Amino acid sequence: HVQLVESGGGSALAGGSVRLSCAASGYTFNTYSWFRQAPGQEREGVAAIDTGDGSTYYLNSVEGRFTISHDNAKNTLYLQMNSLKPEDTAIYYCATWGVGLLESSYAYWGQGTQVTVS
C-alpha cells in the first residue's frame, strides 16, 4: 500500500519562501512530482524528478524559483519554493509512479497541502 503525506504548506508573503515535504511509504518508485490546483483552475504539473538519473522538469512559470529534490534515505520528496508570487497560491499535491508532468500518468497521490501567498 503506497502512501504519500505532504506537509509544510501555509501562508507566505510575496517574495518569501516555503518548503514542502512529501513522505512516501509502502514502495519506492523512480519518478515523483508536484502538482498544484488553484481555485477554479485545472490541476497543473509544477515539477518532476526521476531519481534514477536525477533529471528534473519544471513548469515554465516556476523554473528558477522552485527546486524539486528527493532524499532516498528518507524516501521524502521536497519542493523548495522561493520568490513566491500570489499566483503560486494553490493546493499542492505530490504524486508518484508516473511520467514527467503528465497528470493522467500518475498512479499515487497525496492529500494535498495549501499554500497561500499574499
Image: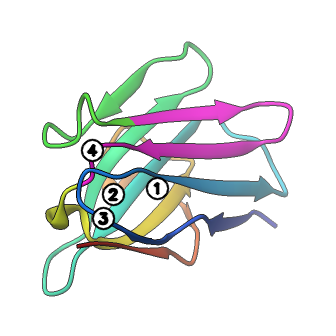
The residue under label 1 is which amino acid type? Answer: Tyr
Residue receiving disc 3: 13
- The region drawn magenta spans 67-84
Determine the secondary structure under disc 1. Answer: loop
Q: Residues at badges 4 and 1 in contact (C-beta under 8 Å)?
A: no
Residue receiving disc 1: 106
Q: Which mark is residue 77?
A: none
Q: Which mark is residue 83?
A: 4
Determine the secondary structure under disc 4. Answer: loop
Mark 3 neighbour density, 10 Å: few (under 14) some (14–19) many (20 or more):
some
Pair 4/1: label in front: 4
Spatial separation of the CA atoms under disc 4 and disc 2: 25 Å
Sequence-wise, the earlier of marks 4 and 1 is 4
Task: Give the mark count.
Answer: 4
Inspect the magenta stretch and tell me whether residue 116 lies in it. no
Q: Which of 39 and 27 is in front in this view?
A: 39
Mark 1 neighbour density, 10 Å: few (under 14) some (14–19) many (20 or more):
some
Q: Where is residue 37 in the image (x, y as percent from the top left)?
A: 28, 73
Pair 4/2: label in front: 4
Q: Where is residue 25 in the image (x, y as percent from the top left)?
A: 82, 57
Residue receiving disc 2: 103
Q: Is residue 6 left or right of residue 38?
A: right
The residue under label 4 is which amino acid type? Answer: Ser
Mark 4 neighbour density, 10 Å: few (under 14) some (14–19) many (20 or more):
some
Q: Which residue sits at x=31%, y=44%?
A: 101
Q: Which residue sits at x=43%, y=52%?
A: 34
